[in-house]
Amino acid sequence: MKKFINKVDKLFTESLHGFAKAHSDIITLYDDPCFISRHQIRKDKVAIISGGGSGHEPLHTGFVGKGMLDAACPGQIFTSPTPDQMLAAAQTVVGEAGVLFIVKNYAGDVMNFEIAAEMLDCPNASILINDDVSLPKTHSTGRRGVAGTLIVEKIVGAAAERGADLADCTTLAERVNHNTASMGVALTSCTVPALGQATFDISETEMEMGVGIHGERGHETLPLSDASTIVNTICTAIESDLKTKKDQKALLHVNGLGATPLMEQYLIYGLAAQFWKQRGLHIQRSLVGNYTTSLDMAGISITLTLLDDEMLNLWDAPVHTANLRWGC
């Protein structure tokens, strides 16, 4: 294992402190319990809070700031943050308007956010993100929350910034989540530093279809295909799930899982955009890059969000975070 590390057990803390120094004009880092808040806290609005294990950067810490998250709670690599982190974050940023927790559908995240919500003495609500169509809706634990989480955070964060109340923010989050579908594919596994080796074995002639973002296998190991075949497989699954119709507006997000060059990501975007164009969809907005990663995994995910006029307007609203910014 070759990584830029001093000591494995200090990687999480040292990385967060480096992030805080690099973006001290945008965020503030709290050490005990650990969470990150926007530097200029607004208590006259609904607070939007998310979080999850590290290893997915820039999700979630990189999206704390004006027009997006008010706070984020990072856990150790691929490990859920604890309820006391979430409680402390909420108590720091929340005002009378309450707090909305945006939670990816993983057992640890769900349980710990629920505990924190029960301990809060202010209005609060939670939205469960489950955009991963590689799992059936009938799966025992439900579908996972993956790259579509960013889309929800951006649109709902903009609404809260404009003064939407807790009920409206929650309803909007549910609408965005319902209209968002994602699926990923990996060419390699990732290496968790504490483990020191790949989380699963895959040969040079194979690919893992339907991977999550925690280094887990997908739903099927397939022979390595060309990019067009891969995009067709993923987009067909998304099309089936969202039941897309001609002339709908959409946002297309191609996300790198950590080790895929932008050259390849843009190739994937071009193929996906062509897929949807052939079906009569209008791609109104795009996002390409490493936004929801799985450490050093070579792979991509494709996310499609069907947009209405309100969602499009909120996507375009100003945002100023470490890793997503425009209009400011």
Image (spheres, rainbow, N blue to C red):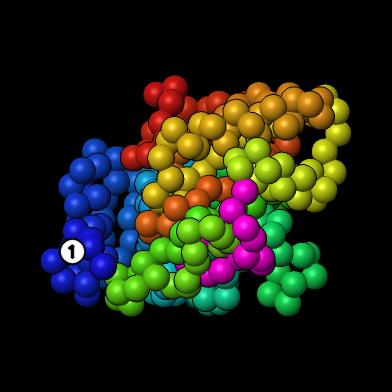
For the N terminus, the image quarter is bottom left
Give 84 or 264, whichever is nearer the viewer: 264
Q: Is residue 235 above or below residue 310?
A: below
Is residue 44 at least partly visible in the picture?
no
Residue found at x 57% / y 36%: 268
Q: To which quarter of the image does residue 291 belong?
A: top left
Q: Amino acid at mark 1?
A: Ile
Residue found at x 43% / y 57%: 297
Where does the image place residue 10, in percent across and percent down from the top left? 19, 70
* Mark 1 lies on residue: 5
Give 15 or 207, whichever is nearer the viewer: 207
Magenta region: 213-225
Q: Is residue 53 above or below residue 275?
A: below
Where does the image place residue 312, in percent across and percent down from the top left? 65, 28
Residue found at x 58% / y 33%: 269
For the C terminus, the image quarter is top left
Give 204 or 58, whichever is nearer the viewer: 204
Q: To which quarter of the image does residue 130 belong?
A: bottom right
For the image, the number of numbered tags is 1
